[in-house]
Image (tube, coloured by chain):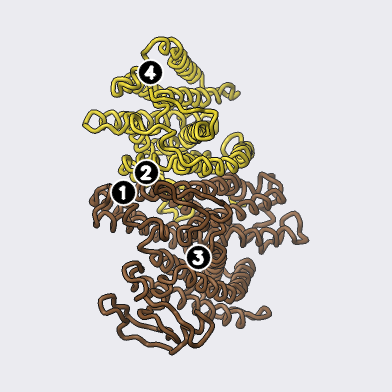
Chain colours: A brown, B yellow
Amino acid sequence: MTATADALVMARMQFAANMTFHILFPAISIGLSWLLLYFRLRANRSKAARTGDARWVQAYTFWVKVFALTFALGVVSGVTLSFQFGTNWPGYLRTVGNIAGPLLSYEILTAFMLEAAFLGVMLFGGERVPPRLHAVAATLVAVGTTLSAFWILALDSWMQTPAGFVMIDGQAHATSWLAVIFNPSFPYRLTHMLLASGLTVSFLVAGLSAYRWLRGQGGPDVQVALRTAVWLAAVLIPLQIVAGDQHGLNTLEHQPAKIAAMEGLWQTGRGVPMVLFGVPDEDLGANRYEITIPRLASLYLTHSLDGEVKGLDEFAGVHPPVAPVFFAFRVMVGMGMLMLLVSWFSAWKLRRGRALTAGLARSLVAMTFSGWVAVVAGWYTTEVGRQPWLATGILRTADAASSVPAPMIATTLAMYLALYVCLLVGYVSVLFYLAGKAAPERVPMEIQHARPA
Amino acid sequence: MPDLPDLAQPAGWLPLVFMGLMGLAMLLYVALDGYDLGVGILLGLATDAEKDTMIESIGPFWDGNETWLVLGVGLLLAGFPIAHGVILGELYLPVAVMLLGLILRGVAFDFRVKARAAQKAWWNHAFHAGSLIAALAQGVMLGRYVTGFQAGAWAWAFAAFVGVSLAAGYTLLGACWLLMKTEGGLQSRAVSWARRSVWLAAAGIAAISVTTPLVSAYVFQKWFSFPNIVLLAPVPLMTAVLFALVVITLQHQPRADERWSWLPFMGTVGVFVLAFFGLAFSIFPYVVVDRLTLWQAAAAPNSLSFILAGAVIVLPVMAASNAYAYWVFRGKARALSYE
């Protein structure tokens, strides 16, 4: 059951395409579910108890539509993944099925229990259940999306830094489930991802709200959503920079080859420089056109100006492909710096109720999907950086592939890609369409609530 | 029949429990997503105004229904990791086609009401096509699975036939659901759809019952050896009775007082349950017919018991909360709003 080289490349491309498509939607729905809960609670807290504070109710009503659409895309792309573990990587389940199975099933069980069952009530039940129960449904959906992330990241982290198991006859068997779940990279990865989701949503909400304002739809509900999002982004981005740094140090300890690829560091040394830019060349064993800052990488990786950092020469044959990891990491960090700049500048411009300006609104619109870019770049950094291993030290990716012929995988890959491109275009255009059209619920709030429910 | 292991040991009974849970999840999936796929298939026959009502009738439920599929596949993955690889590797193509269908209809559900009005017709088509593709592909998967993935044109023709039959069964479920959940002209139309699809569904189940033992010697021996043939006779008999009940009730529907409007739906669900037990009996104790028994394919006992600890807590809560969602949205379908 070994795959040809072509089939392996195709299987990896297909799985990467599906993963990339999938992660876009949880990255929004995790953060957005909590933001919606916040809108809901602000609305319920108001003195106008019957109708709730109109601004927050309207913000909730607009964003819950976005949530419904996002959640649907997350569910359908997630269903795809639960099948593709088997269709594309049968060797994965043969070898680590005893570990991956339970973690994936806990993801499904919790997600199933909290999200799917309460989602109908959260989305459409506003008129049919009491407001407090509605808030409970919204809370459970938010907890459910977060727990989903918990279990999936526990599995992904275990593949990066396995712990709490023994190998018996070529199969992993758990010895301690706590050690399996709370494996060395898990707390860092979970924190990093949850913050990433919060930032993705902040910029999405700020960007779309700014777009609505530019289109003349900037009522009080749009204003409160925009300000909330800008402040959230400004608070989360420094936390994310600290969490990312800690995650990097953890990676240096457990997966030094990944760090060497991220930094484009070819030789082990003391006082190593940070490569601002360069083009890694595997044949040459060095970066072309590189621009460096002396000793800086040693400083932030070892917190000492002449600390030793291992280079790629230490990991001949077992390090990841350098260029994709190197560039993906720079895209992620670059995007993070841009987020810092835009969110702090915006928060300062909007301080104490100051009005939005057209220039600021346009820059927020431009940043609408910056979270997606950073999240995908970050995932490529960590997952390509794991290669050639599927589960570090246990199973190589090449040994897990299926024997499905390459042309069949290529055909279905083409189908998936065509569909995904259409759906992404559809998703983004529907978001802007919803944002641009005059909201019918804006004026007659009281009238709507006055009719018998 | 292969030897059974010691069922007093965890390595003996745990895989059996997982098989039961997985079967339950799959059965719930077929009955529940079956009706909403059926409504999607029927969308091709409806007017634009009817389409809105039809989709509103399944709106609060479809994603909850679909997650039973994820649970079923998840339990296959977690409980029987080796079988997951074998089965889904064999079913690579129909699985890919089914997923495309499910993706298409899942997103169409949301896009059709949120996109520009001019694009709504296009998304309605996508919802219809996606539902039909998913139903046909699931039938093909089932047909391939029960024959143990036999090669050859006949085995594929059988699978294609199961595909059409399952789609007909889903259509019947969908039509009976609409009979319960809608009123007026659409309800009358739903009854006429149900009257037509019931014959196709019955023919499909009868044909599958006859052909499966012919395609598989193992299944033949299980059903037609003495005393099994006597003990199992109630299964086809009850199926026939339920079908007759559904057909007769449909003759007198719709009624202004709504009496018995739930019966065709519940009767059809009963048929699906019986057909499911028939198939499960045919296959047991294999997970992959003639290749892997459920004990050979099972994960390590300590992995299974770890999952079971969670499942015992979660599954009842899940069943209750699903039931609660059905209770909140009980009665005739109403326009959905995010208020």
The residue tagged 3 is: A436
The residue tagged 2 is: B85
Q: What residue is at 47 percent from the left and 86 percent from the top?
A: A296
Give coordinates of residue A95: x percent, y percent. Answer: 40, 49
Chain ID, mark 3: A
Compared across the picture, whether A79 is left or right of A63 comes to left
- Pick whichever, B54 or B295, lies toward us: B295
Residue occupying the far left of the picture: B153
Give coordinates of residue B193: x percent, y percent. Answer: 42, 28
Q: Is disc 2 surrounded by few (<14), some (14 to 19) or many (20+) residues within 10 Å?
A: many
> Secondary structure beneath disc 1?
loop
Find residue B222 and name its label.
Answer: 4
What residue type is disc 3 on?
Answer: Gly
Q: What residue is at 34 percent from the left and 85 percent from the top?
A: A290
Image quadrant holding the C terminus of chain A, namely top right
- Marks 1,2: beta carbons within 8 A: yes
